[in-house]
Every structure is written in C-alpha cells, then in structure tokens.
Image (spheres, helix red, strand yellow):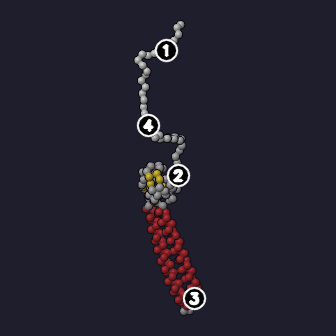
Amino acid sequence: MSPVRAQVSPGGPPAVEVITAEYQPINEVTEINGRIQARERVDLVARVTAFLDKRLFVEGTEVKQGDLLYQLERAPFEADVEAKQAGVAQAQAQLDNANVALDRARELFERSAGPQVNLDNATASQKTAVAQLQAAQAALHQSQISLGYTEIRAPIDGRIGRTSVTIGIRTSTRSM
C-alpha cells in the first residue's frame, strides 16, 4: 500500500467571503408557560324570578360598569308597584280620616262634651293608621326594589364571557 498524500489543488487559495460587522439591536424574547386569568370575575345572578326578555350584549365584547346587560320581564313587577302605590294611597286616606276623628274627639273632650274613651279610641285608631301607612310604604319600596332587579347591569368594566341563559328562559337565583 502506498502512503496517502495531500492533494494540492491547482489555482491558488480558496475564495473567502467577507462581511462587515454592524451593530443591530437584539430583541430578547422570553417564553413562559402559564395561564392568564382576570383580576376580577363576576357571576351575574338574577335577584328575582322572571322570564328573560332581552340580552343586550355580544359575548366576548368589552362592557363598562353600569351597562345594561339583561332585561327581565317587567310587567308583573310594574303591576305590583302600582298595586302597592294604591295601598299607600288607601293607608294615607285612612290616616287622614283618623287624624280628623282624633281632632274631633280631642275638641269634644276639652269641652267636656265627649268621654275619655272616645279620645283614647281615636288616638289608638290614629296610631294604627300611621303604622299601616308605614307598612304600605315599606311594601311599595320592596316592590320598587324588585322592579329595579329586572335590569341586570355590569358591576365592573371588563370583557363579558359566554352566557348560560337564552331569551325566554325563566330566570331565578342562578348565574347568568
């Protein structure tokens, strides 16, 4: 066997490409595996039982605090408010009548033309009428609160997600 010899290529040294080094900014990229979660999360819950009339948003859009999102049926709650307003008016009329009767009984008693028992009864009737008016006003206020619950508004700013109810479904105290 003969020894291996290096072969020299004819024609000179090989061609070498030259480039000029230039300064270029390098953007650092960091990849992190993780999950992004909202700082605040709200589950919307109906506070009254009613049918859903309107959904006033598009899923996945941004909403602002106070935006109307859902509207529940209002007619039964409006009728209840009207009935309670009539109850307040009736209680007010009874109180007005009791005040007149009390004034009359007081005047007669002061002239010694009426017995003490009539004044006592008129005083008790007037106090009862005051209490009935307060109860009617409280019932009206509760009905107005329930009517207000037929509008479900965004409690915070953010992106609204997927809804779990559809128009025509009877809502109750469950997440929307």
Nearer the observer: mark 3 or 2; the answer is 2
Q: What residue occupies the far front of the structure in this picture?
A: 12
The answer to whether residue 6 is seen in the rendering is yes
> Which tag, 1 or 2, sits closer to the chain's start?
1
Q: Which residue is mark 4?
A: 22
> Label 4: few (<14), some or many (≥20) within 10 Å?
few
**Distance (Cα) linking label 3 and label 2:** 73 Å
Nearer the observer: mark 1 or 3; the answer is 1
Amino acid found under the numbered disc labelled 1: Ala
In this rendered view, identify the residue nearer to me: 44 or 82. 44
x and y percent of residue 136 in the render?
51, 71
Q: Which residue is mark 1?
A: 6
The answer to whether residue 119 is above or below residue 132 is: below
> Label 3: few (<14), some or many (≥20) within 10 Å?
few
Amino acid found under the numbered disc labelled 3: Pro
x and y percent of residue 33 in the render?
53, 41
The numbered mark at residue 115 is 3
> Label 1: few (<14), some or many (≥20) within 10 Å?
few
Name the residue at 47% across, 55% down. 157
Q: Which residue is mark 2?
A: 39
x and y percent of residue 123 in the render?
56, 82
x and y percent of residue 113 in the render?
54, 91
Name the residue at 51% across, 59% down. 47
Nearer the observer: mark 1 or 2; the answer is 1
Name the residue at 51% across, 66% down. 142
